[in-house]
Amino acid sequence: QVQLVESGGGLVQTGGSLRLSCAASENIQSFSVMDWYRQTPGKQREMVAFITQGGSINYAASVKGRFTISRDSAKNTISLQMNSLKPEDSAVYLCHSLKAGIDYWGKGTLVTVSS
């Protein structure tokens, strides 16, 4: 059973930065993809950024140029560097991975951006 644990959320002012991390319980190189989603009440869960096993990266249009996803295979972690944060970035950010056709989710970390 893969476990994913997010950290790094918090309260930040508009224009500020946060760095989220997701630690996996096993070798992340075995995952087809790892990504960050975010969820706010009453809205559909949104994919923010993903990185594939081969290293391909993509971002949601709303965060492109502000967020950067990265991977540290030695530490079995992925990170999300979030800059120029806006109030609309406030959400619970969840780490997700796909391995052998099975989805795994972390419990999330809360990001609040004050105006």
Image: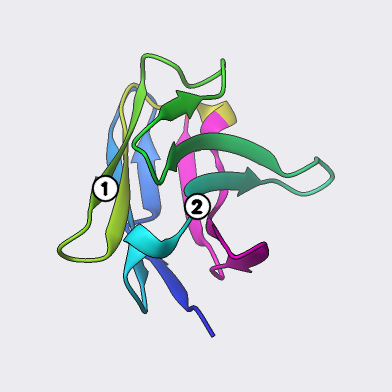
Which percent across, then down, holds residue 65?
Answer: 37, 14
**Amino acid on which disc 2 is placed:** Ser
Rendering coords of residue 93 (x, y %): 53, 51
Q: Position of residue 29 (x, y in %)?
A: 33, 59
Task: Say few, some or many: other residues with alpha carbon within 10 Å of mark 2 (under 14 / 14 to 19 / 20 or more).
Answer: some
3 up-or-down from 33: above or below: below
Q: Classify residue 46 by image quadrant.
A: top right
Can residue 69 be seen from the camera position used here? Answer: yes
Q: Residues within 10 Å of mark 1 (few under 14, many from 20)?
A: some
* Image quarter of residue 83: top left
Q: Which residues are magenta?
A: 89-114
Between 56 and 20, the one lying in front of the other is 56
Frontmost of labels 1 and 2 is: 2
Q: Mark 1 sits on what residue?
A: 71
Q: Is residue 84 magenta?
A: no
Kindly give the residue lying farthest to the bottom in the view shown: 1
Q: At which x and y percent is residue 52?
A: 44, 41
Residue 108 drawn in magenta: yes
Q: Is residue 65 above or below residue 89?
A: above
Which residue is depicted at the point 67% across and 62% down?
101
* Magenta span: chief secondary structure: strand
| Disc ID at residue 32 | 2
Q: Secondary structure at mark 1?
A: strand
Residue 112 higher or lower than 67, as above or below: below
Amino acid at dot 1: Arg
Mark positioned earlier in the residue sequence (1 or 2)? 2
* Residue drawn 29% across the image and 30% down it: 16
Residue 7 in sight here: no
